[in-house]
Amino acid sequence: MELRQEIRETIRIEMQQMQSTLQFYSDKFDDYEVKMKSYDIRVKMLENQYNDLINQNKNLKVQHGALEQRITVLEQAQLANQLEICGIAEEENENLTDITSKICDTFKLNPDNIIKAYRKKSFNKKNSKKPQPAAIVIGLREGNRDQLPLRTPIRPAGTLVNRVITKYISVSHSHPTLLICYGNPNLFSKRLAYINMCGVKMAIF
């Protein structure tokens, strides 16, 4: 009897230990399951955030492209109302107002339609044997540039512009900014090469 009782007690104790062990692992499994569900929720949130960022990036690219196009249109619109005049001699303390007035007389332009006028920085190399005068840029009110002819006739010898006798005037509408060259067109090969080097398309005079 005592032996049976001892065996039963031993089995009971082992069963209790096994139940405790099983309960422990069951609790651990439940904890892991809760954590896995939490991880799944976080992963889904991160996936949603990632997708949102992708969509935002696409929208930003579209907006960026639209802004670039808008800037291009504005730049072209600004250039479309400008004249770039090459070949007018540059003098110290020159009066651009007087030069502009003579240009208006030459091309029959109304001075009131001129918004601004300035001489560009010279692109001549140092110690150049034949330095070319920097171009003069004239900004016109919208629509006034189109009044100029596509190509003007050769001016008679003796036409005076800023104390330079001009024998040739060429007008090119192919450039975003209307280019006008005074003098012999062969003198502007460096000017054309410089502009083409900058990637600007223009007609050959």
Image: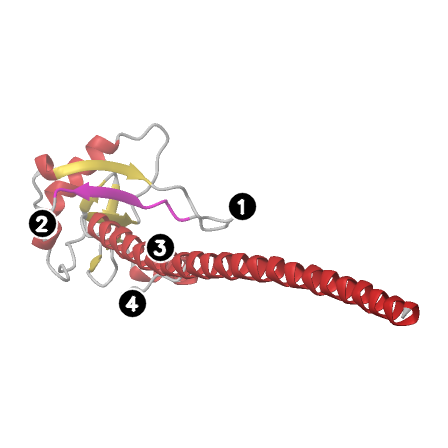
Q: Is residue 183 magenta?
A: no
Q: Earlier in the sequence, mark 1 or mark 3?
A: 3
SS at circle 1: loop
User: In which quadrant is the C terminus drawn?
Assistant: bottom left
Labelled pair 1, 3 in contact (Cβ < 8 Å): no
Residue located beneath label 4 in the image:
204
Q: Earlier in the sequence, mark 4 or mark 1?
A: 1
Q: What's the mark number on residue 183? A: none
Residue 9 quadrant = bottom right
**Which segment is the magenta one?**
132-141
Residue located beneath label 1 in the image:
126
SS at circle 3: helix
Q: Residue at x 32, y 46 (%)?
A: 135
Q: Is residue 142 left or right of residue 27?
A: left
The residues tagged by marks 2 and 3 sit, at their Cα atoms, a distance apart of 34 Å
The residues tagged by marks 1 and 3 sit, at their Cα atoms, a distance apart of 45 Å
The residues tagged by marks 4 and 1 sit, at their Cα atoms, a distance apart of 26 Å
Q: What's the mark number on residue 143? A: 2
Q: What's the mark number on residue 60? A: 3
Instruction: Give the farthest residue toward the right.
Output: 3
Q: Nearer the viewer, residue 120 or 78?
A: 78
User: In which quadrant is the N terminus drawn?
Assistant: bottom right
